[in-house]
Image (tube, rainbow, N blue to C red):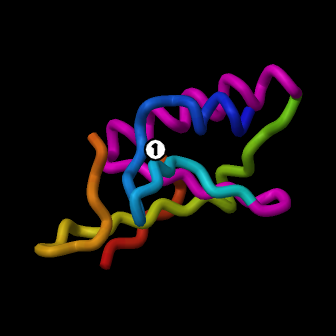
C-alpha cells in the first residue's frame, strides 16, 4: 500500500527528495501540491487499503492547506472531514 502511493508520480520535492507519503506506526501523511493531486493520492491509498482490508477513519482525518510563499524552500514537482487554513 505504501509502495503504491510512494511510486505514484504526484508529490512535492523537499530538500531534493521527492515525497508524497510519510508513515509512522498507524499514522500517514500525504503530501501533494494541489487539492486535485491530494484527491488522486487518496484514491490510490484507499484502493490499495481495501485490498488488504485496511480502513481509514474519516473522523480522524485532517487536511492542512499552506498558501504558496515567495522563496519557499519547498519546490513543487508538479472531501476530508476537517480543514485547517493558515
Viewer-proximal residue among 56 and 70: 70
* Magenta region includes residue 53: no
Q: What stretch is highlighted in magenta?
A: 24-52
Can you say whether 21 is above or below 47 in the image?
below
Q: Which residue lies furthest to the front in this view?
A: 16
Residue at 40% across, 58% down:
16
Can you say whether 66 is above or below 17 in the image?
below
Percent of width and height locating residue 11? 42, 45
Residue at 55% across, 62% down:
62
The image quadrant where one finds the C terminus is bottom left
Q: Which residue lies furthest to the left in this view?
A: 70
User: Which quadrant of the view contains residue 2?
Assistant: top right
* Magenta region includes residue 49: yes
Percent of width and height locating residue 80? 50, 50
Q: Which residue lies furthest to the right in this view?
A: 53
Residue at 60% across, 35% down:
5
Q: State the residue position of label 1.
A: 79
Viewer-proximal residue among 17 and 50: 17
Viewer-proximal residue among 52 and 83: 52
Viewer-proximal residue among 36 and 17: 17
Percent of width and height locating residue 57? 73, 50
The image quadrant where one finds the N terminus is top right
Q: Is residue 85 toward the left or the right of residue 23 in the image?
A: left
Percent of width and height locating residue 65? 35, 64
Residue at 51% across, 36% down:
41
Amino acid at each position: 500500500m505504501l509502495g503504491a502511493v510512494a511510486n505514484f508520480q504526484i508529490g512535492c520535492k523537499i530538500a531534493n527528495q521527492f515525497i508524497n507519503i510519510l508513515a509512522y506506526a498507524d499514522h500517514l501523511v500525504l503530501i501533494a501540491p494541489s487539492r486535485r493531486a491530494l484527491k488522486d493520492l487518496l484514491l490510490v491509498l484507499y484502493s490499495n487499503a481495501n485490498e488488504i482490508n485496511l480502513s481509514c477513519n474519516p473522523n480522524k482525518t485532517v487536511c492542512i492547506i499552506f498558501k504558496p510563499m515567495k522563496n519557499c524552500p519547498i519546490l513543487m514537482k508538479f472531501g476530508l472531514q476537517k480543514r485547517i487554513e493558515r
